[in-house]
Image (tube, rainbow, N blue to C red):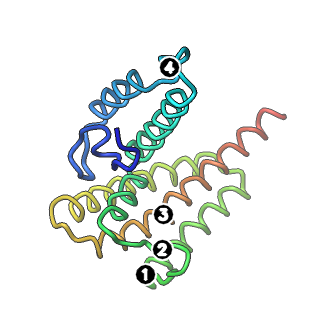
Amino acid sequence: MDLTTDFYSLFQLPRAFRIDLAELDARYREVQAQVHPDRFAHAGEGERRLSMQWATRANEGYLTLKKPLERAKYLLHLAGHDLQAESNTAMAPEFLMEQMEWREAVMEARSGGDHHELEHLHHRLRQDLQGRYEELAALLDDKQDPESATEQVRRLMFLEKLLLEIDDALASLEDGEMDN
């Protein structure tokens, strides 16, 4: 086994955004069954260390391919496309306006303690994300357009972060309700 093998090869999956998650789960279990450190408990130090490296690599690959955003970033990386997420913060003005509107709505609902509105925003954003991931799948798998896919991934990073903020707001309201 080669530790530099890409995650798709490791799990014997086609290099694509659209993957069968049940198949990924099964392939992950197969790899883990082969390399799990418990199988090498009585082996030499070198074999145990290699087993640990492979188990770690399999875990990393599984977590990367299981999450759509991480899978997309990884595919772009394999294709040689840098997201430049830290250095390139330029976004279309309409997307930035949309982000401001979302954030204002979340802040209002949070400060007003409006649990129902936060759940509504969460549901709307989840639907929006689903549509954007379908667009991303088409860009990566059907059109092979990594430039447009890179832009879509950068937008999805913002939206996923916003979803976490909504989740945090909901959790803080629920914690507050439990304290009363």
Q: Are marks 2 and 1 in contact (CB under 8 Å)?
A: yes
The single residue placed furthest to the top in the displayed view is: 42
Q: Which residue is found at the position 37% from the left and 45% from the top?
A: 65
Residue 52 is situated, as x and y percent measured from the top left of the image, at: 53, 32
Residue 56 is situated, as x and y percent measured from the top left of the image, at: 51, 37
CA gap between label 2 and label 3 equals: 14 Å
Res 82 → quadrant: bottom left
The residue to which callout 1 is attached is 94
Task: Assess disc 3: are there few (<14), some (14-19) or many (≥20) residues with their C-alpha within 10 Å of its C-alpha.
Answer: some
Residue type at mark 4: give it.
Phe
Residue type at mark 2: give it.
Glu
The residue to which callout 3 is attached is 157
CA gap between label 2 and label 4 equals: 53 Å
Of residues 80 and 171, the one nearer the viewer is 80
Q: Are marks 4 and 3 in contact (CB under 8 Å)?
A: no
Mark identifier at residue 98: 2
Disc with the residue nearer the chain's start (4 vs 3): 4
